[in-house]
Amino acid sequence: MPNGDSITIADLLEMQSGLYSYTENSYFNTVLDENPGRVWDPEELLAIGFGGAPYSPPRQEFRYTNTNTVLLGTIVESILGTDLRNILADRIFEPLGLDDTSFPASEDAELPDPHPHGYLFGTNESARISVKLSSAQVDNARSGVLVPNDVTDLNPSWIWAAGGAISTAADIATYGRALVRGEEILGKDLQSRRIGSVTLEPDNPSPGDYGLAWQAYGPLIGHDGAIPGFQSFMGHDPVSDTTIVVLCNVRDGPAGGRPANEIAMGVLQRLQSGMK
């Protein structure tokens, strides 16, 4: 892999490896549009990622890339000698009692009933270029004249370790709280190092530091997630013991922006104003 002799595990977690993201590849997005049921192997995804020119040398800049997370998944499988599906179930889902959370097999694109449908304005290839619609299209979307495409059946194997789990708001809230507080997931020393990788700014809810695979949002520590059709936000405030989870069934708003994040920040601001 490019710069493989100098990229560390921490670089991958902190999104500072400089590796090209396979999700920005035109061929890849065209295949998603034309063959949404295709099953992708992690090695295929990494081959696309490694085939692109690195954004920068390691540790030179923050650049979010799903190639990092897929690579981390293959590293975990190699070290533990079993597949990621079993690892997540044994180490996270079952210990935390996440009964409505799963990591499906690559060939399984079904969502458990009952479930919403997921929508995307435009196509994966058009969104690769820009998630923002034209001003006329934004007006038509807001009036209901332009409707998004139903992409519920897109096989999530293409995202794999970077976001292929299925869950509920209640389970995500349980996971988010445990993740930040370190309960039943990481040892004390590693949890302390991870907490120290971000700086919380309670009065500034905009996205802040990106640390060891999570981000600061004002007083919250958490992460967002997005695949065509769905977008989510999870954040936990370790001081007030408040958890915010937002799930949306459209990835991008017509004018751009991630709807779950925007809703979550609105909720956070209302909570903060009520506490003053």
Image: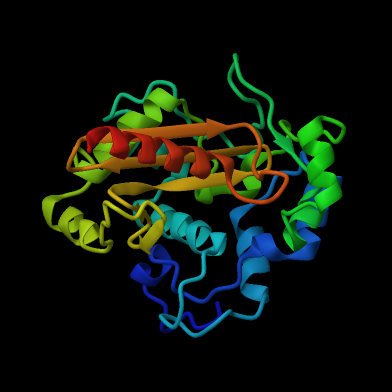
Q: Is residue 26 left or right of residue 84?
A: right
Q: Quadrant of residue 5?
A: bottom left
Q: Is residue 121 left or right of residue 256?
A: right
Q: Quadrant of residue 148?
A: top right
Relative height, residue 232 to residue 161 (above, below):
above
Say which of 266 and 150 sits in front: 266
> Looking at the picture, how far across and down is residue 235, in whole percent?
36, 42
- Numbered-mark total: 0
Relative height, residue 5 to residue 260 (above, below):
below
Q: Quadrant of residue 140?
A: top right
Residue at 66% across, 59% down = 23
Please say whether residue 150 is visible from this viewpoint: no
User: Which residue is at the far left?
Assistant: 188
Say which of 51 and 174 sits in front: 174
Residue at 51% across, 43% down = 262
Please say whether residue 263 is visible from this viewpoint: yes
Q: Is residue 175 left or right of residue 120?
A: left
Instruction: Locate the C terminus by quadrant.
Output: top left
User: Which residue is at the far top?
Assistant: 114
Say which of 256 and 113 sits in front: 256
> Looking at the picture, how far across and down is residue 10, in whole percent?
34, 69
> Looking at the picture, how far across and down is residue 164, in whole percent?
55, 41
> Looking at the picture, how far across and down is residue 237, in whole percent?
25, 42
Residue at 81% across, 55% down = 126
Residue at 38% across, 62% down = 210
Instruction: Locate the N terminus by quadrant.
Output: bottom right
Coloring scheme used: rainbow
